[in-house]
Image (cartoon, grey):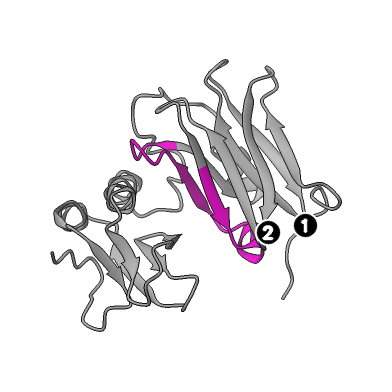
Amino acid sequence: MLVPARVGLALRCPRCGKTAVHELSLFELSGNPSVRLDCSCGQHQATLSRRRGRLVLQVPCFLCDGLHHLPFRPGRFWQGAPQAVVCQETGLHLGTVGSPELAREFADPAPAYGSVDPGVLGDYFVNPEVMYEVLAAVHELDEAGRLRCRCGNAHIDYELQPDRLDLVCPRCGSRRSLGAATEADVSRARRARRLEVGAPSSRPGDGRP
């Protein structure tokens, strides 16, 4: 499989208010345990490192003052598949990972920090605001320990599609899709008291208690 050599990462800067675009090469981690990413104004924005066969993006968050750790499979990361970088506390958008062209496209202008940005990845998602609401609901369940796989794994990966959020168990490969295109999808996600990946009776968007 052909893997592109460069990936783009667009992140909002809390110091200068702009969205900085970082282009990462497949070879930048060669011989280096990590790569530090800084805005042109000098503000530290993220660190990309290798850990146990995965790439981990560490993002200091200006929304919750926490440090978010986002794990990626190396193949998927270097393919440049679009993926939102979201604050795990607020569910709001911090940036995006994808191709360098995609990152540059959504870097200007940077919106106000306090609101969901419907322009970022707006050409990719069917309804960006609905996607961010569903992401926020799933993050809340994840933080509360109510997102897991039937195999017992509690570390679930997210894959963002234009009209849905795919939950994937990296241990056994089980998947579950949640609709993320309509207000009804948001309501289902908000009503869910727990989510289980791999349940034989699960349906996309099913939020059964």
Boundaries of the magenta span: 69-93
Q: Is residue 117 left or right of residue 102?
A: left
Residue hosting label 1: 5
Q: Is residue 51 left or right of residue 136?
A: right
Q: Nearer the viewer, residue 9 or 167?
A: 167
91 in the magenta segment: yes
Q: Quadrant of the C terminus?
A: bottom left
Residue ID at (31%, 43%): 129
Q: Tell me the amino acid under the disc marked 1.
A: Ala
Please, is residue 186 above or below residue 206 in the view? above
Q: Residues within 10 Å of mark 1 (few under 14, many from 20)?
A: few
* C-alpha span from label 2 to label 1: 7 Å
Residue 136 position, x and y percent, is: 31, 45
- Asked whether the viewer can see residue 79, the reply is yes
Q: Residues within 10 Å of mark 2 (few under 14, many from 20)?
A: many
Residue ID at (37%, 72%): 152
Mark 2 lies on a secondary structure that is helix
Q: How many marks?
A: 2
Residue 20 position, x and y percent, is: 62, 30
First in sequence: mark 2 or mark 1?
A: 1
Q: Quadrant of the N terminus?
A: bottom right
Q: Mark 2–mark 1 contact, CB under 8 Å?
A: yes
Please, is residue 15 above or below residue 5 in the view? above
Residue hosting label 2: 78
Residue ID at (59%, 38%): 10
Residue 165 position, x and y percent, is: 36, 61
Q: Nearer the viewer, residue 60 or 81?
A: 60
Q: Quadrant of residue 185?
A: bottom left
